[in-house]
Structures are given as C-alpha cells and as structure tokens.
Image (cartoon, rainbow, N blue to C red):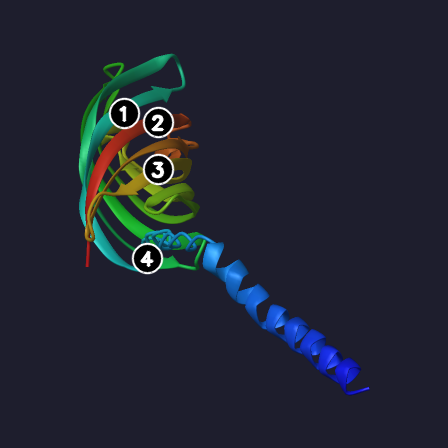
C-alpha cells in the first residue's frame, strides 16, 4: 500500500511541477513586444477671426452713371469709409458711413461730384478670415447743375482679413435716384470699388 501512495505522490508532484514550468517556458520563448509609436495629436484648427469692432479706411474704383434721355458717363470714384461690425459666430452684421469723391461727366448735362451713403450690411463668414456680405441703404448724390438728391442703393462685397487689424476687399453697388431733385430725370449709377480698412 505504501508503494502505491509513494507512486501517487510522485505523479501529483510531477503534474504540479509541469504546471509551474509550462508558463515560464512559454514566456521564455516569446519575443519582446515592439515599442508602441507615440501618438501625435492633430493640431487644433486656427480660431476664426472676430469681426466685432470699429473700422475705418479708404476705397477706390469705377462709377458708371446713366440718366433718362440716353445720358451716360463713367469715371473714377473713391473716398473714405467708417463703420462698426458685430460678430455673431457664423454671421456678421454692421453699419457704415461712406463718402466718395467723383468727377463723372454725364453726357455733358451734369457732373457727378460726390456720393454719401448710410449703409447696413450682413454676411456669412467664409473660412477663418473671409466675409461675404450683402449691403444696402440710403445714398445722397451731388450732380452739380442737376442738383442734389437722396435715393437708395443695394449691393454686395467680399472682405478678407490679412492681419489682426487690416482687411482688404471689393464691393459692387447699384444706386437709384428717381426724379433727381425734382428734375423729372431718373438717374442710376453702378460702382465697383476695392478697399482697405483698419480695425480698432
């Protein structure tokens, strides 16, 4: 009986030893894991420009003027602008005052000498630093011998911030003056101008 007990003890000991040595043997032959590559986070997108604030600058371009009776003329126009914008996140709303000097001969009957505007504008931000907008408001034109009259204008433009405080852009406007200064003559004018503005 004792022989069987010794034999059983040796078998149990052998099984226990094999169980202990098997994981060690498996680990001894396994290669070291490759080092993991460092995770590089993507750079955060640049923050969008905040358009809120006052601005002032200058503009220069071209005016095409037409009046009843086949009268027309074109020439240079340019002046100053001063305004304020408020940034709502994806959209911008603002107002401005423009004053342009001109010397456009309208068919020898009158000369467009200046145009003043009170304008509203609203637009959508494009990318990080662009603004596409529509604009409109009241315009007053001085046409020399034909007098001075108030009408309205509509148009649109695009503005691009090129630094923290300076933007460049272009704007096209269509003006309408009905019965100019009681003369019975309707006058319209189209202007296309480039502009640069400082923000403060």
Position of residue 115 relative to residue 31, above or below, is above
Q: Is residue 110 visible?
A: yes
Tag 1 near tag 2, CB within 8 Å: yes
Residue wearing tag 1: 63
Label 1 to label 2, Cα distance in Å?
A: 7 Å
Image quadrant in which you'd find residue 178: top left
Q: Earlier in the sequence, mark 1 or mark 2?
A: 1
Position of residue 158 relative to residue 188, above or below, is below
Nearer the observer: mark 3 or 4; the answer is 4
Label 1 to label 3, Cα distance in Å?
A: 18 Å
Q: Position of residue 47 (x, y in %)?
A: 34, 55
Disc 2 packing (10 Å; few <14; some 14–19; many ≥20): many
**Residue 158, numbered circle:** 3
Label 3 to label 4, Cα distance in Å?
A: 16 Å
Most foreground residue, 5 or 144: 5
The residue lying at 20 percent from left, 53 percent from top is: 164
Residue positioned most to the top: 70
Tag 4 near tag 1, CB within 8 Å: no
Residue wearing tag 4: 50
Q: Quadrant of the N terminus?
A: bottom right
Residue wearing tag 2: 189
């Amino acid at each position: 009986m004792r022989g069987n007990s010794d034999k059983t003890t040796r078998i149990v000991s052998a099984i226990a030893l094999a169980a202990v040595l098997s994981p060690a043997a498996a680990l001894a032959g396994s290669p070291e894991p490759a080092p993991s590559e460092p995770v590089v986070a993507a750079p955060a997108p640049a923050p969008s420009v905040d358009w809120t604030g006052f601005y002032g600058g200058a503009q220069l371009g071209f005016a095409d003027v037409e009046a009843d009776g086949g009268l027309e003329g074109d020439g240079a126009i340019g002046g100053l602008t001063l305004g304020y914008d408020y940034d709502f996140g994806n959209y911008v709303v603002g107002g401005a005052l423009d004053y342009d000097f001109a010397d456009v001969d309208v068919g020898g009957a009158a000369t467009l000498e200046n145009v003043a505007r009170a304008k509203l504008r609203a637009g959508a931000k494009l990318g990080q630093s662009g603004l596409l907008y529509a604009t409109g408001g009241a315009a007053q034109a001085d046409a020399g011998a034909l007098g001075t009259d108030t009408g309205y204008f509509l148009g649109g433009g695009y503005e691009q911030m090129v630094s923290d405080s300076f933007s460049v852009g272009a704007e096209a406007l269509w003006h309408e003056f009905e019965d100019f200064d009681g003369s019975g003559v309707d006058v319209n004018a189209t202007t296309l101008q480039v502009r640069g503005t400082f923000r403060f």
